[in-house]
Image (tube, rainbow, N blue to C red):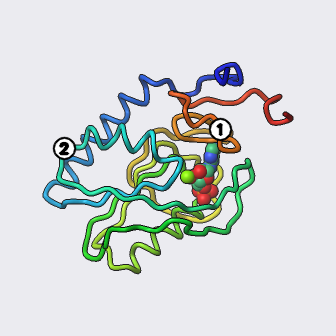
Amino acid sequence: MIHDDIKKIYITEEEIQVKTLELAKQINVDYDNKRPVLIGLLKGCTNFMMDLIKRVDLYLETDYMDVTSYHGTTQSSGIVTIDRDLKVDIKGRHVLIVEDIVDTGFTLKKIIKVLKDRGAASVKTVSLLDKPSGRKVEVSVEYIGFTVENEFFVGYGLDYREEYRNLPYVGILKPEVYSK
Ligand code: IMP
Ligand code: MG
């Protein structure tokens, strides 16, 4: 079972739910009357996006971008490609990017620039996790769920080689999993 591969549960399901509600309440206040477009970055955003938008009590639209920067390993590269683009026209719209984790910052920096260049009225980011120790480029993240240490995390959307996204919590893998 996938749970057996976990060395440690780092953030529990309950902690995530409490934090998500907190973030949603702040977004309710900050985006009141702004009809924002929430843009999820696939695939890591999915679990967080679903839980977050249920708690945001605003008129909003959702859309998704599929962006590759990680290639499914623990090594990050600075190359960011858009594999699936938006359907919504974001010109003049208030955009809120929904991320699972900000690590080097390459992904976010590139996407923020793309969205601003398309004429968004504002571009901000909400990320479940922030790993500041991994940062290689400066980027601002307005809403952060949890600031985490320099580890590799899986679960609640986050993958290792495309697996473990379905864990209901955020955890750290046992070292032997990497040598499988
Ligand atoms: P960045 O461009 O380095 O900031 O990378 C952001 C993306 O890398 C995230 O959206 C994740 O998909 C992936 N990533 C970064 N750190 C982790 C991790 O600890 N576990 C799983 N994926 C990660
Ligand atoms: Mg991601």
Q: Earlier in the sequence, mark 1 or mark 2?
A: 2
Q: Residue at x 17, y 53 (%)?
A: 59
**Residue type (three-letter) at the residue carrying disc 1:** Glu
In terms of secondary structure, where does tag 2 sit? loop
Label 2 C-beta lies within 8 Å of the nearest ligand 2 atom: no
| Left/right of residue 79 with respect to residue 45 in the rendered view | right
Residue 133 versus residue 178 in the image, above or below: below
Residue 90 versus residue 53 in the image, above or below: below
Q: x%, y% of residue 127? A: 45, 48
Q: For marks 1 and 2, give the one nearer the viewer.
A: 1
Residue 62 versus residue 122 in the image, above or below: above
| Left/right of residue 142 with respect to residue 147 in the rendered view | left
Residue located beneath label 1 in the image: 163
Q: How many marks?
A: 2
- Quadrant into which the C terminus falls: top right
Q: Residue at x 37, y 61 (%)?
A: 124
Q: x%, y% of residue 94? A: 27, 65
- The residues bearing labels 1 and 2 have C-alpha atoms spaced at a distance of 32 Å
In terms of secondary structure, where does tag 1 sit? loop
| Left/right of residue 4 with respect to residue 56 in the rendered view | right
Please give the label number shown on residue 46: none
Residue located beneath label 2 in the image: 57
Q: Residue at x 57, y 34 (%)?
A: 155
- Nearer to the camera, 26 or 100: 100
- Nearer to the camera, 110 or 43: 43
| Left/right of residue 170 with respect to residue 20 in the rendered view | right
